[in-house]
Image (cartoon, helix red, strand yellow):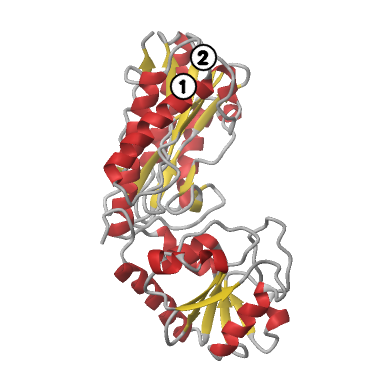
């Protein structure tokens, strides 16, 4: 097994778990449309476009997959354990892909049986249009199990944790490259590209010649822009006195962490020190509330208690965090509206934030593992203001 992929035995254990669930719920098979659920259950990764990819899991027997012609050659490379492959030429084609799916279900004797699904149609977007499952197999019945699969994904296996640990190591590396690349007078995008290139070259050397992916991208915004969430690096020139909000989450074997930091260019001002310290205290309040048996909502309530005491509620705009793994945001959510019980093996991003309009935003985001005793950090980049000051 490659150190940087999920092993075939683990994939087969996931399939077996789904098949056991199908037997327990008296369903004959499953049709999985969502790309991330398909990846989780089969190991087959693809870019979801207008061309449907559908995983079909009989309650008994081997897994099958329907793919467009352009993906056919990827099956033996990425998922050699899948041998039943239905191929259609193109979308929309003379014969629509959903009709090819009907033929696959007929061949597996599932076209008139109870089926578990995560959707009734392909949701890839990109201009896709087409009939739904009830249109093409009207004799079948359907039960949506999207939440069941997503609940399984919340608790990570040792193999998943190994990939997340490598992602964290690379995110640390990317932040070190960013710290070194920041110079007043350079544009955000130039600094970001320099850091990303340096970190990605190191990532390629570390993971070896079979690695391919999106690289060790490190993004950031600077100055007053940081008071607005989800902005991108652009043409603004970094200045002495800027707050920098960073982000990195290199993908390793399909898994990623989230690491975000607030850096300060030059000697921090008293105001910057104040809000830097308050944000770290807010994050510490969240971390102290993370333990098995606590509810996700308890974590946000703990932070809100701190924010209300410090009269900071009006500066907070988001919930406290979320699950992460295959996707950048997964369940559960550290939000008062989420009563999910925390369990050992869950992986969470913890990122309370303070936004001062017209001034700056302050946020650390760390990825942590829920343990039997409480939590442990997966991301390990320094959080203190001295380490995150860019000396110029």
From the viewer's perspective, is 174 left or right of 103? left
- Could one spot residue 220 in this view of the protein? yes
Query: What residue is disc 2 on?
Result: 238
Q: Secondary structure at mark 2?
A: loop
Measured Cα–Cα span from mark 1 to mark 2: 9 Å
- Could one spot residue 379 in this view of the protein? no
Quadrant assignment, res 81: bottom left
Q: Residue 27 location in percent, x, y?
A: 53, 85
- The N terminus - image quarter: bottom left
Residue at position x 44%, y 76% in the image? 18
- The C terminus - image quarter: top left
Residue at position x 48%, y 43% in the image? 321
Q: Which mark is residue 191?
A: 1
State whether residue 325 is above or below residue 228: below
Q: Mark 1–mark 2 contact, CB under 8 Å? A: yes
Q: Residue 264 location in percent, x, y?
A: 43, 16
Q: Residue 383 location in percent, x, y?
A: 35, 27
Q: Secondary structure at mark 1?
A: helix
Residue at position x 37%, y 21% in the image? 179
Question: As rendered, which of 362 and 316 lies closer to the eye?
Answer: 362
Mark 1 or 2 closer to N-term? 1
Q: Which mark is residue 55?
A: none
State whether residue 235 is above or below residue 169: above
From the viewer's perspective, is 299 left or right of 4? right
Callout 1: 10 Å neighbours few (<14), some, many (20+)? many
């Amino acid at each position: 097994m490659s150190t940087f992929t999920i092993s075939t035995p683990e994939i087969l254990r996931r399939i077996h778990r789904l098949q056991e669930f199908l037997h327990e719920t008296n369903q004959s098979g499953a049709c999985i449309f969502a790309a991330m659920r398909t990846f989780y259950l089969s190991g087959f990764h693809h870019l979801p476009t207008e061309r449907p990819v559908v995983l079909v899991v009989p309650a008994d027997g081997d897994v099958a997959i329907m793919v467009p012609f352009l993906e056919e050659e990827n099956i033996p490379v990425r998922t050699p354990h899948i041998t039943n492959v239905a191929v259609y030429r193109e979308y929309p084609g003379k014969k629509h892909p959903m009709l090819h799916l009907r033929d696959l279900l007929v061949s597996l004797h599932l076209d008139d049986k109870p089926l578990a699904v995560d959707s009734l149609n392909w949701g890839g977007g990109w201009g896709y249009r087409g009939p739904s499952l009830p249109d093409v197999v009207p004799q079948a019945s359907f039960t949506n199990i999207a939440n069941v699969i997503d609940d399984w994904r919340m608790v990570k296996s040792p193999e998943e944790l190994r990939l997340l640990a490598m992602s964290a190591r690379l995110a640390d590396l990317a932040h070190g490259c960013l710290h070194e690349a920041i110079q007043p007078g350079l544009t955000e995008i130039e600094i970001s590209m320099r850091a990303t290139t340096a970190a990605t070259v190191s990532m390629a050397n570390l993971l070896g010649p079979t690695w391919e992916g999106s690289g060790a991208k490190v993004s950031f915004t600077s100055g007053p822009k940081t008071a607005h969430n989800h902005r991108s690096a652009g043409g603004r020139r970094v200045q002495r006195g800027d707050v920098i909000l960073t982000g990195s989450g290199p993908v390793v074997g399909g898994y990623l962490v989230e690491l975000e930091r607030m850096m300060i260019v030059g000697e921090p001002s008293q105001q910057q020190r104040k809000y830097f310290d308050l944000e770290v205290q807010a994050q510490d309040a969240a971390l102290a509330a993370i333990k098995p048996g606590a509810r996700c909502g308890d974590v946000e309530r703990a932070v809100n208690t701190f924010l209300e005491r410090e009269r900071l509620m009006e500066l907070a705009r988001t919930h406290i965090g979320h699950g992460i793994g295959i996707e950048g945001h997964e369940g559960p959510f550290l939000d008062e509206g989420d009563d999910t019980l925390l369990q050992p093996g869950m992986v969470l991003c913890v990122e309370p934030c303070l936004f001062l309009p017209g001034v700056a935003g302050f946020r650390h985001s760390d990825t942590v593992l829920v343990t039997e005793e409480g939590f442990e950090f997966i991301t390990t980049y320094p959080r203190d203001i001295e380490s995150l000051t860019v000396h110029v």
